[in-house]
Image (tube, helix red, strand yellow):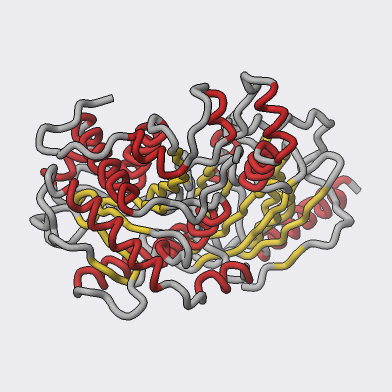
Amino acid sequence: MIKSLKSIFLSFTACLLLVGEAYAADNAITAGRIWPAQDYTRMTLEASKPIAYKMTLLQNPERVVVDIENVDLNQVLKSLNDKILASDPYIMQLRVAQFKPGVVRLVVDLKAEIKPTIFTLLPAGDYKHRLVLDIYPVKDPLMTLLAQRDNAFSPTAEVQAFNQLPLSQSSTEPLPAQQSNNSTLDPVIEATAVMPTENNKPAEVSPQIKPVESASSTQAMVTKEAPENKDVDKFIRQITIAIDPGHGGEDPGAIGATGSREKDITLIIAKKLKAKIDEEPGMRAVLTRDSDYFIPLHGRVLKARKLQADLFVSIHADAFTNPAARGSSVFALSEKGATSASARYLAKKENESDLIGGVSLNVKDPVLARTLLDLSQTATINDSLKLGKAVLGYIGELNKLHKNHVEQAGFAVLKSPDIPSILVETDFISNPDEERRLNDDAYQDKLVLSILAGIKKYFASNPALAKTKLAMQ
């Protein structure tokens, strides 16, 4: 009898081994990355083969469940939770386990109600096959900010604000962090009755930079005389300049000889430029991204338009196969063709950012479609050329120019029909000397002052009257 039981046990064990072999995973997750931001948090998994998945959104408490098929639990997946920051606005923690042979279950515990988007990407750049999970807030932080600003500019609010100076809080301050959900966590290995979604396979101005018109002259163009009270400026419409730090997140941009990443350089310069613009009376700057995360090219355009920006300035650091290439450049949009072979090459390279950074091609924005197909762009391009010429003139006094005129090409990020837009290639990050300068704090400050001087010169001749909104008549 004992021998019989032993024989049965051995047979059962052998069956289990055979079942395990039958479900042996034929794919493996080789990398995992998480990019938290106020706009959204992105989680990316990478593998040598296409990643099959099922996603389920559960509530009470809020969580996203992703079943990754044909993979086994490995150290890359086990360490994902270590990449979650306490400051992440949306993700509380990640839990992962081998749900069944060949299927790993990933549970994303959330801090608030969210809108998830999941999609796969084909190999691009240095990346292999990717699975991307984007965690968006139910309410767009940018639209919330705009609603607060619009409320602040309403006639009732303006009268109340004027009668109760000083104002309490600026509507442009960062939004508060999302509150954590302290609900009891469910077991990671759980049966779910929800139908899953299948995948579908400060520095001095350099002596050589000419002085420009005073800030007071710029302010006079956009506001009527008001009482000399700084609090009054809080509800007078200011010139808004959208600053776009190129690349970010999954998309590092160009890489310098010593490892400098374009996405890091552009963010540093953009933040410095914003700080200088914010010091100017009657002007304010907003960033399309304020940390290391990816924004699609069309998303940058839409952000600027939602903010009713008067100008759009995209900051980049050029790269070329020849490390001897050097000099600064300024580009505007072209409705026809590129003005040079190098401009065409650069536009093609920059427009491929969406492939590297990762954009779901299934998400279509009808507003974007109308925006990019707008045919009344000629006047805006002319203004963009004027802005570009002014900025290029001042940068040329600081640095050698790659071309001494504003070039044009079909840059997707410049396709706003109603906002003068330029793309500034600060230096060639692929040139060792210029890469070294791009990392120099003093040089960054001089570069920022040059761009600001060009912006102020543009407004001296082209007042932003069309979008001016006065709080008091």
- Counting the numbered discs, the total is 0
User: Viewer-proximal residue, 42 or 211?
Assistant: 211
* 304 w.r.t. 184: above or below: below
* 233 w.r.t. 130: above or below: above
Instruction: Report the residue at 29% width, 63% height from top.
Output: 385
Q: Residue 379, position in %: x, y?
A: 39, 69
User: Viewer-proximal residue, 279 or 10?
Assistant: 279
**In this rendering, would 454 be left or right of 187?**
left
**In this rendering, would 382 be left or right of 241?**
left
Q: Residue 24, position in %: x, y?
A: 62, 61
* 261 w.r.t. 206: above or below: below
Instruction: Report the residue at 67% width, 27% height from top.
Output: 161
Instruction: Report the residue at 81% width, 39% height from top.
Output: 187
Query: Would residue 161 be seen by someone viewing this image from the given angle?
Result: yes
Query: Would residue 28 be seen by someone viewing this image from the given angle?
Result: no
Q: Residue 237, position in %: x, y?
A: 54, 41
Q: Which of the 4 quarters of the picture holds residue 462?
A: bottom left
For this orientation, the residue located farthest to the bottom is 336
User: Viewer-proximal residue, 4 or 293?
Assistant: 293
Q: Quadrant of the C terminus?
A: top right
Q: Residue 347, position in %: x, y?
A: 31, 68
User: Viewer-proximal residue, 463 or 28?
Assistant: 463
Instruction: Report the residue at 72% width, 58% height from top.
Output: 55
